[in-house]
Amino acid sequence: MSDAFSERMKNIDRIFYPKSIAVLGTNNVRGTVPSDILTNILKADFNGVVYPVNPKERHLFSIKTYKYVIDIEDPIDIAVIVYPSSVMHLALEQCGQKGIKGAIIISAGFKEVGGKGIEREEKIKEIARKYGISFIGPNCLGVINTDPEVKLDASFARKTPDEGDIAFISQSGALCTAVLDYARAKHIGFSKFVSIGNKADISEVDLLYYLKDDPKTKVILLYLEEISDGTALLQAARTVIQETGKPILAMKSGRTHAGASAAASHTGSLAGNDEICDAAFKQAGIIRCEDVEEMFNKAIAFTYQPLPKGNRVAIITNAGGPGVLTTDAAIHCGLELPKFNPETTKILKSELPPTANISNPVDVIGDARADRYNAAVSSIMKDENVDGVFVILTPQSMTEIESIAKEICHIASQHTKPIYTSFMGEADVAVGVDILLRNRIPHYILPESMADAFASTYKFTKFLEDVHKPIPEFEDVDVQKARGILDEALKQGKKYLPEEEAVKVLEAYKFPVLKSGLAESAEEAGKLADELGYPAVMKIISEDVVHKFDVGGVVLDIGTRGEAEKAYNTILDNVKKAKPDAKIKGVMVRKMIPPGEEVILGLKRDESFGTVIMFGLGGIFVEVFKDVSFRIAPLDNIAAEKLISETKAAIILGGARGRKPKDINALKETIMRLSQLAVECPQIRELDVNPLIVLDDGKGCFVADTKIML
Amino acid sequence: MDRVEIQNRIKKVISKVLNINEESIGDNANFIFDLGADSLQSVELVAAFEEEFNIEMEEDKALEVQTVADATEFISQYLK
């Protein structure tokens, strides 16, 4: 750990746990940000000393007030600054002179307004660097730490949240206030609450490293509008998740943002910003959420209850319809409804009425009171075939909502299996829901949300089991040869590699490529076809033709020497018609790959996340079907496996509709070779292998066509 | 009108608008950071300078005037 890193962590710790705070630019005009920042610190009962700083006032809210921060005699841990942006540099300069190492800059008027604002932000960054100050903001709501040791609310939020074990980091201050209001209604507390605003200095990456070691935080929630350093974010997330097992849930806005710009390769065209972000998050173990509700539904599942050991859930309901809905949702989310063991069945049979359904999902029948729920839930919780329990309640005239909620809380406290609930309705069930949430039993309005939250916790536990797999390294590759070809092409100013050279690069990395030859006449084509074997395939070789099929530059299934000679002339005629100015090098001839499934492999460089590897259904309709999936290189065996399994192509490769299963192992190896090529040859900007033909299991796969962009 | 006279009149205007003692206003004082003007008062100051010196300050340039020294320089140039 570098000195700079540990100094930064110390500064962030000062921001969360200050013993003294100077509030610069505060005043007593109630209902304004400068005033509310100070009053929130006072109202939260901050366990330290506050020093208001205002050039005109001698006291604010009966507290001695200083003209300048440098006038304060005592040492100051952090500054909370609400001066207008035009004088922020003066305020921060004085903080530096005072020896303050941490600051929260609330004011707006910086990068977000453009023009002078950008200059102002650069100026404060420069001052912060000069004095070694770490700061949150500018343009933010502030920072809250509910730890009773400090009780810090340096924000202008309406109310300070309750203490809890969820940390929330948000780039949007406005969303912060909405989240606080939402969470309060559901009795959800926070450990740390940070609005990072423009994140001119301290970013989500720094905070993830800090929260990794925060004993008060069990789950980290992120709301991000832009990711400035995706690689650093993923590294930080991996560190948090792998070292501590703390889940990270993230909302990243901008899903509908214009995706990939015009690109030369299929991969470039299909890998939009959001798809890459999605893939990167998945790979690092970050759970991406669509909205605030989903994020908190999952957050309470993680913090309130133990993580499940498996995906087998039991459903207990007092109504058939909701039971079926929940079953559907559970199956849809990849959960299983196991059979109970005989002991459980025996208890259910003796405790429930004959009309009850005693198999999973259990229906305790509409007139069930607390005793039936108690009998069902407590016996099923003991069943070793069950990893978690969903309790559904609909409010009927005799339903003892309050008692049932209390029974569930009591049973949950005696077990290490998770119980989730869905008391359906609103007004009548409110009293029960309140009891459940106050006792940290996750409650969901919709059974779908309940199943989704459970599935998330289960997938996360599976992810934790898989994280330490090594990245394979193939030693049979010829890095120097591949780099030599690429460097030479770059030296010649080429933007894309001619196919015969692209093939050589792949050969250097031991991709499965069939031997081929270049014919410059019909006669040569016939001779080559005879040598390489039939059936043969022939395709145009021209730097001016990228999509060969589109111009009639490919002929397949050539069976004789005569057909090969004819194909040569056909290809040349077609290309000359479609692209009269194309410079033609000749026609490539090789033996045709036996029939198999066509898939695509690709790579693309992303400014934020690094190298993206793509896999999907291949062929000429790749951009029509868009059945693709992405990961960030380097890939381990599991990442390669998931890259394949996320697509519909995986079903086809597995042997859909009576076909023979294809050689997945050969495909996986080719994907990992591509990953190694991507990491070791940064000269490649984009690459497509399309199609890669995957043969029957045990027979390998072959590159049929490739494009490499530099 | 010489610079000293301009500066004195500027300080008088500031003293009146911000309701502070004229003697406490330094030659380089920043309206917000040193004298405690809020954003509205900063605009009022510009209007008061215009009235005092019977001039019209361009909005963009006027917003860049943040200190007594800035105002003295700006108005001196204007009155030349």
Image: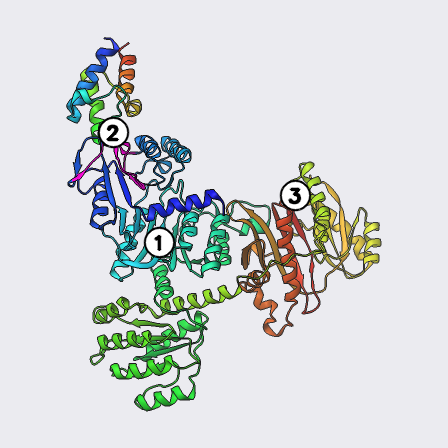
In the structure shown, which secondary structural element does the residue marked by tag 3 occupy? strand
Q: Give the range drawn in magenta.
A: A63-84
Chain under disc 3:
A
Q: In which quadrant of the rendered view does residue B14 lie? A: top left
Q: Which one is nearer the viewer's eye here, A219 or A323?
A: A219
Give the total of numbered labels.
3
Question: Whole-percent x and y of residue A654?
Answer: 60, 70
Residue pointed to by mark 2: B32
Mark 1 or 3, nearer chain start: 1
Q: What colouring style does the render use? A: rainbow
Point out which mark residue A168 bears.
Answer: 1
Q: Is residue A344 left or right of residue A174?
A: right
* Mark 2 surroundings within 10 Å by alpha-carbon count, few (fewer than 14), some (14 through 19), many (20 or more): many
Q: Residue at x 80, y 46 (%)?
A: A520
The residue that appears at 17% across and 36% down in the rendered structure is A59
Q: Mark 1 packing: few (<14 Cα in 10 Å), some, or many (20+)?
A: many
Same chain shared by disc 1 and disc 3 = yes
Q: Assign a secondary structure to mark 1.
A: strand
Please identify, in this view, whether the residue under mark 3 or under mark 2 is nearer the observer. 2
The residue mark sitting in front, 1 or 3, is 1
Is disc 3 surrounded by few (<14), some (14 to 19) or many (20+) residues within 10 Å? many
Quarter of the image for residue A701 reads bottom right
Residue to which mark 3 is pinned: A496
